[in-house]
Image (cartoon, rainbow, N blue to C red):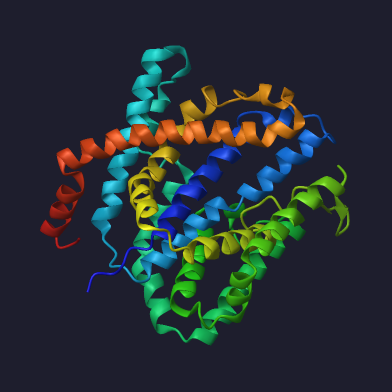
Amino acid sequence: MKQEREYGIDALRIAAMWMVVILHVLLQGGVLENVEKGSFRYMTAWFLEAAAYGAINCYGLISGYVGVKTRHRISSAAALWIQVVFYSVGLTVIMHVLMPDIVPAVSWINGLFPVSLGYYWYFSAYVFLSFLIPLLNCVLLNAPEKELTVSLSAVLLLLSINACAFQRDVFLAGRGYGALWLMVLYLVGGMIRLYGDSLKAYQWIRRHAVIVFLLAAGAAWGMKMLVGEQGIPFIGDKAIPADAMYSYVSPSMILSSIALFSIFADWKPGERTCRWIGRISPGAFGVYLIHTHPLVYRHCLGFAFTQLVHVKAYLLPFAVLGVASAIFAVCAAIDLLRGKLFRLLKIKERCQWAFERIGLS
């Protein structure tokens, strides 16, 4: 029996990528660095940052939530890899034509080997994860619920407290920028799918999702606003910095991402909305590949939006959200064309055929 598509999860893919663009407008776009410290604009910009910061975690949760109930195909990862190379090389060519002076020779090599050379850190981590998905699913489907809950809770506590309080990456979580953290999120997402109805902590977050999201983001923001440059004294000469909670592995971002996930997982959009979600959702990954391409990210987005800090204070959030929406729309439209080209060339089907020929699929 064909499984019913969960359009709430597809909508989360769209919303999370839009939030990622917001983060990049604020940081790479130069808003956070140029806004006057202590001003209302400063407080507004950093709250937007806190509210959007858990977006990447949502993608890890989605991977586990969907993957634990779906047959894993290596050919699908291969098709994604072709999409990545399409953009990594294609955008390098375009940037070379438009601005040849900014394209170093190494960019061509990086474009051909985006995974090994970390051109897109999230995709590199996901590729590593994809080969472990059968093992992770085996754990999720066979380990007792109680043991899974205790183990994952301990892992989350160790990673989050160590990274935020001790400011040391002894477990190689890389503040969430890597495969280890993505694997942890995969397991959490899988547990929500399998045992969400019986997990008391998740059910509590689910019932108070909006409040949890706002409080979690507010905690990170409040710490940033209230803690001085010296940070919070902790051990010896070590201090917890004011932005310690602005980390994928921080308790605030874990809670905010789970709360956001639960909101969309429970959403049942209408038929017309589902049609729009179905059209836009496949382009979310393309939005990521286009606007975070290193040359585009550095030379097109780099300090491109510093003028936003001069708009009226109450208009700043609307300006940031508007710019992010425009970037998302342009990139999604480009990827819509790429999708039509790939369907015409039957890229997905050819990848599946090739892997089936060697005994994989």
Image-quadrant location for residue 10? bottom left
Image-quadrant location for residue 47? top right
Q: Is residue 179 visible?
A: no
Classify 338 as above or below 213. Answer: above
The front one of 25 and 299 is 25
Q: Position of residue 143 (x, y in %)?
A: 44, 84
Q: Is residue 200 visible?
A: yes
Classify 35 as above or below 192. Answer: above
User: Which residue corresponds to the image point at 70% horizontal and 32% vertical from the top-left?
Assistant: 315
Residue sticking out furthest to the left = 357
Q: Is residue 31 left or right of residue 97?
A: right
Q: Is residue 207 left or right of residue 349?
A: right
Q: Position of residue 233 (x, y in %)?
A: 88, 55
Q: Quadrant of the N terminus?
A: bottom left
Q: Position of residue 161 (x, y in %)?
A: 71, 64
User: Which residue corresponds to the image point at 19% horizontal and 42% vertical from the top-left?
Assistant: 343
Q: Is residue 126 left or right of residue 318?
A: left
Q: How many marks?
A: 0
